[in-house]
Amino acid sequence: MSEHKEDAVTGASFMKELKQEKDPSSPWPGPKGMIPVTSGKADDANVHNRAYLDNILVEMRVIDAVKPDLTTEIFGKKYASPLTLAALSHLNKVLDDKSRKPMQEKAAAAKKMRVLNWIGMETDEEYAEIVAEGAETVRIIKPFADHQKILDEIKFAEDHGAVAVGIDIDHVAGTNGDYDVVDGIPLGPITEEDLRRYVNSTKLPFVAKGVLSVRDALKAWKAGCKAIVVSHHHGRIPFGLPPLKVLPDIEKALQGTNMTIFVDGSLMSGYDAYKALALGADAVLIGRGILPELLDDGEKGVEDKLQKMNEELSQLMLYTGVKDTESFDPSVLHFN
């Protein structure tokens, strides 16, 4: 296994050899296409996110505690864990070894571990090749300026057996203050009416990914979305709130709506995931937490890391008397 190095500020870990090849002027921690590491300065939302996570402490409630059941229901389907594999993109392009396809390896690991897989920005052809691995999948689509492209990708995902579809509502702005451009494709604004149109175009549950306020959570619900991902998309927004800080208010605002609440944000361990679940998430997305293992060791690396995270989650649930994923109690948490 290659040696890993972890960024102490952002929580992003990645392969040592890729780090050594990094262009100092590039925002990518290795070849273009990997999760970017942001500035590490005060405007870096990852700094505040990591600090917030690390300052949540847990009290012990062990009398009458039993080994927990991690089985989790998402969109009416049962999965082995509330840990899901995040919507990574482009990873088939980053390795020198072109015989490997990390996106397929990740999907294969999700199938083997019986967890939900997410896929980010990929062409329809590439998406079809990835889902052929057989993992149950959520497809997340960019907010393309061409709305027909969004509708076409929704339809393609539906035709290829997706569990749900969604859109990165937080990938509208570029660093130049204009709408972003990804892979040469212009992105554009997303209105509540746009969301409603996408929701109504499919029979699948629709996910608004990148919610960081009660306001947007309620707009997503009013538009008919069945789920949200509370997230700042690996720190895209300068000075962004930690997702876990706003999560309890969002969960309270959505009570009684039957919305599924996911959360992400550099959840690097099962302990991090526990805190997110205790604060109101139904399930979590793990991206940075599996990235080095995926790129180093493929399917087996992801399976081993996910197993370790499940063990950490189960350990903390057992220490706090949480018997299953429906029984989390935020009162066990204390802010240092």
Image: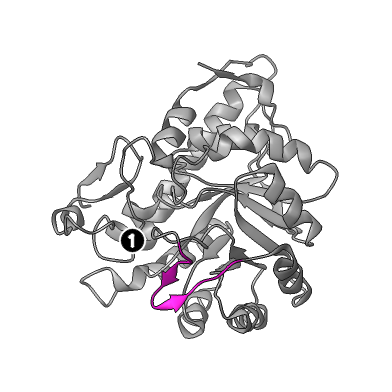
At x 62% / y 81%, what residue is drawn?
Answer: 160
Q: Quarter of the image holding residue 167?
A: bottom right
Snapshot colouring: one colour
In depth, the one of 318 and 157 nearer the eye is 157
In depth, the one of 175 and 100 nearer the eye is 175
Count of labels in the image: 1
Task: Give the percent coordinates (x, y) of residue 34.
Answer: 33, 61
Task: Give the percent coordinates (x, y) of residue 117.
Answer: 55, 62
Task: Give the percent coordinates (x, y) of residue 114.
Answer: 58, 58
Which residue appears farthest toward the right when viewing the image? 256
Structural crowding at the residue carrying mark 1, measured as other residues with C-alpha within 10 Å and reported as few (<14), some (14–19) or many (≥20):
some
* 324 with respect to 110 (left or right): right
- SS for callout 1: loop
* 327 with respect to 50 (left or right): right
**Residue 13 visible, this angle:** yes
Which residue appears farthest toward the front when viewing the image? 177
Residue 181, magenta (yes or no): yes
328 shown above or below 294: above
119 shown above or below 39: below
* 23 with respect to 89 (left or right): left
At x 46% / y 36%, what residue is drawn?
Answer: 49
At x 68% / y 20%, what residue is drawn?
Answer: 331
Kindly report the secondary structure that dominates the magenta region of the rendered protein: loop
In depth, the one of 171 and 179 nearer the eye is 179
- Magenta span: 178-189
Q: Quarter of the image holding residue 61?
A: top right
**Residue 101 visible, this angle:** no
The residue to which callout 1 is attached is 34
Residue 97, magenta (yes or no): no
Q: Quarter of the image holding residue 21?
A: bottom left
At x 31% / y 39%, what residue is drawn?
Answer: 40
Q: Amino acid at mark 1?
A: Met
